[in-house]
Image (cartoon, grey):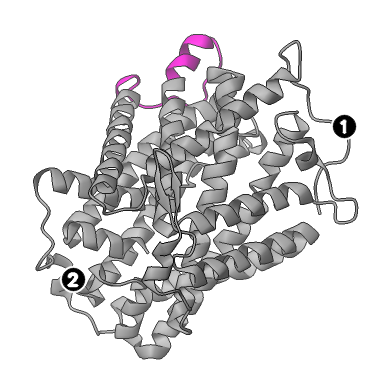
Amino acid sequence: MRPAEMAALLGSPGQIMLVWLVAGLFTLLSTMVLAEVGAMLPETGGPYAFMQHMYGDFWAYLYGWAAFAVINCAGTAGISFIAAQYLEYFIPIPRFPEATELAYALHVPFVGSIYPLQNIGVKILSIFFLILFTVVNYRSTRTGTVVQFIFAASKVAAIFLMVFGLFFSGKGNWQQLSMDSTSIHPTGMALVLAWVAACNGALQALDGSNTMLYVAGEIRNPGINIPRSLLLGLVSVIAVYLAINLAMFYILPMDTMAGSSLVASDAAQVAFGSVGGGIIASLITLSVLGTTQVNVLTPPRMTFAMARHGRFFASAGKVHPTFNTPGNALLIHLGVMIVMTLSGSFYILTDMYIFIVWVFNLMMMAGLFILRKKYPEKQRPYKVWAYPWLPLLVMAFNAFYLVVTVYDDIRNYQLGKTPMMNSVFGLIVTALGIPLYLYFKSRYKQGSWPEPGAEGEAGG
């Protein structure tokens, strides 16, 4: 999805490649800062545990809430849109006339307007996928794992065909790798805003590189293996994304790419004909369904754990008596994902969640300085390079990205280009966790929250 958006923003293959490299370097340096924290505090729970050491219960809880409501539920809902949209390659998905779509709106104060009927066919199909995977994981985690293996194989096949198939098709033009758009030439402040918006896409694609920190407590030799795995994994993924973009530039002129809604299938159709385009559309649909499946499977475990600790509604911490799965937590996530699906689109939901990811990443990078002062004698198997200048540089870039993103969202909303301010929406949803924190905290007089109960863990 993102290469077409970047083409429409920047209109230049060279600048798009540079965006991927800059976003990749930013993500890499940010991840290496977090690697010091992960190697020093190899605790299962990752950023949630780190926030507790850095800032205490309140900010740890707010991160947990944001991970539930925005990062996981909104992010997963946004990703499920891709599968539904790529199915439009095969079948027309019905939608209401534009007048009907815009006739019913929900106005959210300080955020903008939500149009639940907009692109309703894609939304219903996305919700169907979310319900399907919730049912699969509700009944058995093992079944979900088998399904995930099939989806993972589709992902590898799609990447292989996209890169090698397009390059060896002979249907492209090598000169297009250096040919800019004939009509898209942002300059000045418009170029800065286009760059930041394009970085949103690259940062979202690279998000997840630090997921291994959630299981840091289960990794052998964390001081060596955490930094090494983060570095090798992220560099490999950056290389794959660069190769995919180059293959698309080879096949599609920049203006064609900028106007494409299904850019991968459009490139494959040029290279291999309608059958090839259909094969790529099928593989991408399966690949994205795999991402949706794993995001339906794993995040409810955090909600389940929070409930066991008294930080969420007790019903979410119950194990299903027959299936031995965190059934209630799965259903709660499903409900929120359905609401998020009806409220937005792929770009609204993913831009919202990646903004919140980097808000907390900024806090965790600042937390490195807190931990150095708080635990001066603690063993650090890995230390970030060029401390304190490198972390300060990354934090400055992070803060610049967040400020410009908010400015751009507000500006586009005021100009009528977008129906809502995605970053502000994410901040408001995150802030809804504050009254929940106060409610659950008030239930314990001495301010110490209970440990998880000894009763059975969720498995399935």
Say few, some or many: other residues with alpha carbon within 10 Å of mark 1 (under 14 / 14 to 19 / 20 or more).
few
x and y percent of residue 451 in the render?
Answer: 78, 25
Q: Secondary structure at mark 1?
A: loop
Identify the residue at image location x=56%, y=40%: 67
Q: Nearer the viewer, residue 172 or 6?
A: 6
The CA distance from mark 1 to mark 2 is: 60 Å
- Of 309 and 16, the residue lying toward us: 309
| Residue type at numbered disc 1 | Ala
- Does 427 appear above or below 236? above
Instruction: Name which residue type carries label 2.
Output: Asp
Q: Report the quarter where the C terminus lies.
A: bottom right
Q: Which residue is mark 2?
A: 255
Q: Are marks 1 and 2 in contact (CB under 8 Å)?
A: no
Give the main secondary structure, helix, strand or loop, of the magenta stretch: loop
Quarter of the rendering containing residue 139: bottom right
Q: Position of residue 91 (x, y in %)?
A: 48, 84
At a point 79% along the width and 40% down the height, the residue shown is 315
Q: In front: 118, or 259?
A: 118
Compared across the picture, whether 166 is left or right of 437 comes to left
- State whether residue 334 appears in this view: yes
179 vs 423, left or right, is left
What residue do we see at 80% from left, 46% from top? Answer: 458
Part of the protein shown in magenta:
368-389
* Foreground label between 1 and 2: 2
Q: Is residue 97 left or right of residue 191?
A: right
Q: On screen, 338 above or below 212?
A: below
User: Quarter of the image holding residue 258?
Assistant: bottom left
Q: Earlier in the sequence, mark 1 or mark 2?
A: 2
Query: Which residue is under mark 1?
Result: 454
Q: Is residue 38 above or below residue 118?
A: above
The percent coordinates of residue 65 (x first, y second) are 59, 35
